[in-house]
Amino acid sequence: MKKLLALIAVLGMLVFGATNMLMAQEETAAAGENTENTEVVADEAAPVTENAMSTSSEEDVVESTSMHAAIKQKFIEGGAGFMAAIALCLIFGLAISIERVVYLNLSDTNVKKLVNGVEDALNNGGVEAAKEFCRNQRGPIASIFYQGLMRYDQGVDMVEKSVTSYGSVQMGLLEKGLTWISLFIAIAPMLGFLGTVIGMIQAFDQIQAAGDMSPALVAGGIKVALITTVGGLIVAMILQVFFNYCTSKIEGIVNNMEDASVSLLDMLVKYNQKNA
């Protein structure tokens, strides 16, 4: 877990570094474009064919613009600070979600096969054989069975209490990390809305400074302001899918735990009656 957190921290630093580099590149490109425009205006004697070639090359560059470049451009237009925060929510949320998905899939076992194996071991080798069988199995159900069998000598009632108590512990382990995913789901749109509000304030400041209600000025400011909201909503939707998957997976595992616990108690009652 410490290695995962360290990796996430490194990724966050890379995101901030990449953001600063992208802003520097955009400023350099804008300065270069202004220089080129000045040279073109000064050189009025240039042939018409050169202008045509320049126009065609610009069209080729626009057509060859990749999806990565478009996303980078929108990221910069939305504001490096808020978009980087939203990107960090996505990185942290995906890291926790992937870890939870892997853990839950490893915790999901074949309950019928496990119960049959415990029953065979109990009938053929007794309680010690059943404990050894559970020790060699993975998943929360096998752990619950093992804890219950450890207290078999104290009576079936004590086994039932142990199964119930340890089942709560295993349920807590299954739900670990879901609160962080839900936090990122809530925070990402809020960051987007905050960036939108601040962007709108800046747009109105520009209108006030210009002293003119220009449609182009208003539309440009609103477009840039809404990019943060779009980014936050996209992050929330992605993480919501993982959250719902993990929740449904936990519900299935908990139901299997309850059914298997009842089966274990029935097996122990039959085993007592057989050996009485």
Image: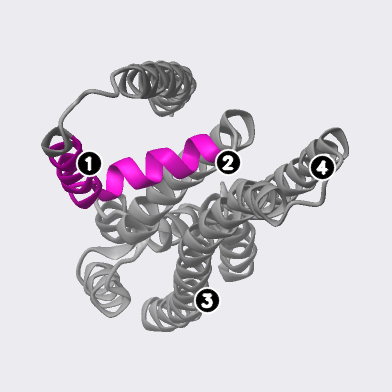
Which span is picked out in magenta?
Answer: 51-77
Instruction: Give me the disc on residue 138.
Output: none
Q: Nearer the viewer, residue 254 or 31?
A: 31
Residue under label 1, please give it.
Answer: 58
> Which of marks 1 and 2 precedes in the sequence?
1
**Residue 75 position (above or below residue 247):** above
Q: Is residue 130 visible?
A: yes
Q: Are marks 3 and 2 in contact (CB under 8 Å)?
A: no
Task: Kindly report which numbered mark, 2 or 4, lies closer to the viewer in this rendering.
Answer: 4
Question: Magenta-highlighted stretch: main secondary structure?
Answer: helix
Task: Indicate the amino acid at tag 3.
Answer: Glu
Which mark, by number, is residue 207? 4
Query: Are discs 3 and 1 less than 8 Å apart at CB?
Result: no
> Residues under labels 3 and 2: Cα distance?
49 Å
Magenta-colored stretch includes residue 61 = yes
Q: Nearer the viewer, residue 123 or 243?
A: 243
Colour setting: one colour
Which amino acid does the dot numbered 2 rest on?
A: Gly
Residue, x 64% and y 58% (percent of image)?
A: 165
Q: The N terminus appears in which quarter of the rendering?
A: top left
Q: Are marks 2 and 4 in contact (CB under 8 Å)?
A: no
| Structural distance between the alpha carbons of marks 2 and 1 | 25 Å
User: If you read the primary sequence from the N terminus, does the residue marked by circle 3 or circle 1 appear first?
Assistant: 1
Indicate the secondary structure of the residue bearing disc 3: helix
Mark 2 residue crowding within 10 angstroms, few (<14) / some (14–19) / many (20+): many
Q: CA distance from mark 2 to mark 4?
A: 19 Å
Residue 122 pos. (x, y %): 29, 69
Lower sequence index among marks 1 and 4 = 1
Query: Circle 2 is placed at which residue position?
Result: 78
Disc with the residue nearer the chain's start (3 vs 2): 2
Give the structural element (helix, strand or loop) at label 1: helix
Which corner quadrant of the image does residue 268 belong to?
bottom left
